[in-house]
Amino acid sequence: MKRDASVTWTGSAREGTGIFRVGSGAITAPFTYNSRFRDGSQTNPEELLLSALAGCLTMAMAAALREQDGTDGWIETSAELDLVPHESGGYRIPTMRLELAVAGATNQDDLELALQRAMDMCPICNALGGTDIQVTARPS
């Protein structure tokens, strides 16, 4: 299975504009320097990466919970990352933090087991091996 995406950029890094396009056509989104490194109102690669991780891990958690006790549930995930300057002159993402609120969960030990299984199953978690991904799961 392959997935694809494309980006078009016009202009300089600081004053140009770009457009993300996912292969399915479901998302086409503009971005700029300001949307990445200031408070722009458009998206940026970091938000898209964080959304991909949150979506993937949430779905994997649903699968892990189903595998563990046969139940389906409701999960709400919040996520944030740190974008920090790097000595290379660019930036890096040392840490991503996610919190999963799981409806109907009563046993924290079972949640932790399901979370570990979910992280093992999540291809985005596996792709981000150089980043500290901190995840907590709690009953909602």
Image: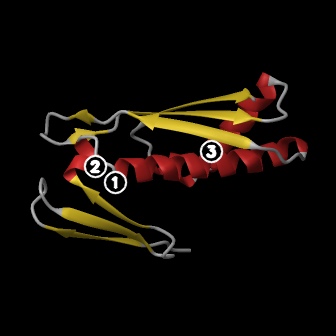
Q: Amino acid at mark 1?
A: Gln
Side of 112 relative to 25 (left or right)? right
From this view, report whether residue 61 is shown above or below residue 134. Answer: below
Is residue 126 at all visible to an observer of this figure? no
Instruction: Using the rendered image of the protein, determine whether residue 60 is visible from the camera's viewpoint.
Output: yes
Q: Which residue is mark 2?
A: 35
Q: CA distance from mark 3 to mark 2?
A: 32 Å
Q: Earlier in the sequence, mark 3 or mark 1?
A: 1
Q: Which mark is residue 120?
A: 3
| Image location (x, y in percent) of residue 51 | 50, 50
22 and 4: which one is in front? 22
Out of 35 and 7, give the one closest to the viewer. 35
Q: Quadrant of residue 106?
A: top right
| Residue 5 x/y as whole percent | 40, 71
Residue at 44% of width from left, 46% of height from top?
128
Report the amino acid beneath label 2: Ser
Q: Is the residue under label 1 in contact with that under label 3 (CB below 8 Å)?
A: no
Pick the residue in front: 19 or 57.
19
The disc, 1 or 2, on the residue closer to the chain's N-terminal end is 2
Q: Residue at x 62, y 39 (%)?
A: 77
Which coloring applies here? Answer: secondary structure
- Find residue 8 and report its horizontal and vertical position in percent: 25, 72
What's the residue at 70%, 44% (across, down)? 61
- The secondary element bearing badge 3 is classed as helix
According to the image, label 1 marks what residue? 42
In the displayed orientation, state which residue is furthest to the left: 12
User: In which image quadrant can residue 42 be found?
Assistant: bottom left
User: Circles 1 and 2: CB distance less than 8 Å?
Assistant: yes
Relative side of 20 to 119, left or right: left
